[in-house]
Amino acid sequence: MDESVVSLANVWAVYEGERHATLNGVTMNVLQGEQVAVTGPNGAGKTTILEVINGLLPITSGSVRVLGDEVTRDSHRLRSRIAYVPQSLFFAPDTPFLVRDVVIAARFGRIGRWRLPASSDRQQVDIALEAVGMTFAARRPIGRLSGGQQRKVLLARAVAQEASLLLLDEPTANLDPTSKGEVADLVADIRTTLSATSIVVSHESGPLLSASDRSVALDGGTIASMSNKDLSLAGAI
Amino acid sequence: MFGLPWHIILPTLLGSLLVGAICSALGTFVVRMNLSSLGFAMSHAAFAGAALGLMISVVDPIWMAILFALVAAAVLGPMTDASRLHVDTIVGATFPLTMALGLIFIHKAPSSGIGSGALSLLWGSVLGVTMDQVVLLAAVAAFLVLVLFLFGKEFFALLLDRKLATASGVDARRAFYVLLFMVAIVVAVSLRVTGGLLIYALMVLPASAAFQWAYDIKKILLLAPALGILSSLAGFLLSLGADLPIGASIALSSAAIFFASILLSPKRRRIIAS
């Protein structure tokens, strides 16, 4: 029997200070192990969907359930099982963090309060960096890496986090064609390794979209169209 | 002033070193997280509180300074946190308000007047530190170490990126407020040494200098308090030797270390080379 990992029911969301809702009654489900692509023009609400799924943006009405739990702003434990690669996050050249420290920070939510990282956490960092082919850069400053390498480090955080759900916001944006292909391959490998479900936001076609099980197209905060696969999906259109 | 007896000099020396360490340690967070303006506002709120304490003469002014700084953190933190107000707007509004309140309270204080102890709140005093205050500073330093230990992971994640921290399950909001309240407490208890006008320098300059020397935040977290202690020691000696206000002397030495760090920074050399 299929089980929903992500379930949005009539979700409305608005950013503070905005007069109009960014999501207007979106309803969708994502099943265990699926990769769903969310597409649409700028301002369609693609990033907003990811932000309401991990609770970064509170919803104004409706319901968001992830991995069986209702999502709220205080769903810290739940978020520790969700890997999120935000859109256009690039570290400045003088960012004072080494690559391995960027990766181990992804485990802090899992480790919980009042506990220090253990040797097992550091081992998981080594595994994660190896998985994305970035072991050589473990002791390098994150800001000295190329955009594509930084993307790989952010994906390594997902591996280190041992996430059940990947939320990837334009993970190949601003990368050269070679790096796009590498990142797409890594996402596929990570999904397999973690047996994870993933939601990928993109406004351009490419290997990530073609590797998705289905796609949801947003426009003006509503679901404009969807791929014709077996899904319990309904849009407010 | 080098001829002053040790029982007068020692509390100020110890107080200066402690203030250098705790301000600079927290300064690493303040600088990296762009909270300088908030720290600035809190330091002036602490000054206004201490001045009120002098005026009412019921409790030690330091407790009123702590109260005012904590209230400032509690009020200003959520405003900037939710981006409801631009941080420059907040500082623009709070600076004249707190300075005006502070100066009015000093004017009304029983011991007001140029050269009085009240004015040492503005620029610090080499003679204004007692052993009781040193004990308080040491207690705050110990508390800060405990907080840094308990919230170390959360603070570390905040320093990297607040959104990433929140998204990976860290209670970044709680850690942010713990940090703000620690800044408020540290600013308030440091007031006697450096004065309300210049405490800001000790919070920002040594930490900014430390950022010039390393790419590893763990090293920076150790280097910043070391540079803070060095700034305080140099400022203390300058104050004694040249008979200058200690707060201004510490600010000058902090600035000298900061500019030297910029000139000698290996990061800068690397950028020029590339």
Image: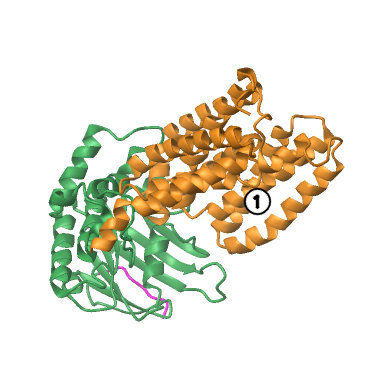
Chain colours: A green, B orange
Residue A46, position as x, y percentages in the image: 36, 72
Report the residue at 31% width, 68% height from top. Answer: A232
Q: Residue at x 63, y 21 (%)?
A: B131
Chain letter for mark 1: B
Taking depth in this image into account, of B187 and A45 the one nearest to the observer is B187
Q: Which residue is mark 1?
A: B75
The residue at the point 61 percent across, 40 percent down is B247
Q: In this picture, is A174 found above or below A89? A: below
Identity, as a three-letter code, of the amino acid under mark 1 = Val
Is A210 on the left-hand or right-hand side of A163?
left
Image quarter hosting the N terminus of chain A: bottom left
Q: In percent of the image, x 13 and y 65: which residue is there? A: A182
Query: Horizontal placement of A33 versus B173: left or right?
Result: left
Q: Examine the structure image and report whether residue A234 is included in the region drawn in magenta.
A: yes
Q: Quadrant of the C terminus of chain A?
A: bottom left
Q: Which residues are magenta?
A: A231-237
Task: Identify which residue, A64 or A229, lies in the foreground.
Answer: A64
Q: Is residue B235 visible from the viewing direction of this image?
A: yes
Viewer-closest of A180 and B18 = B18
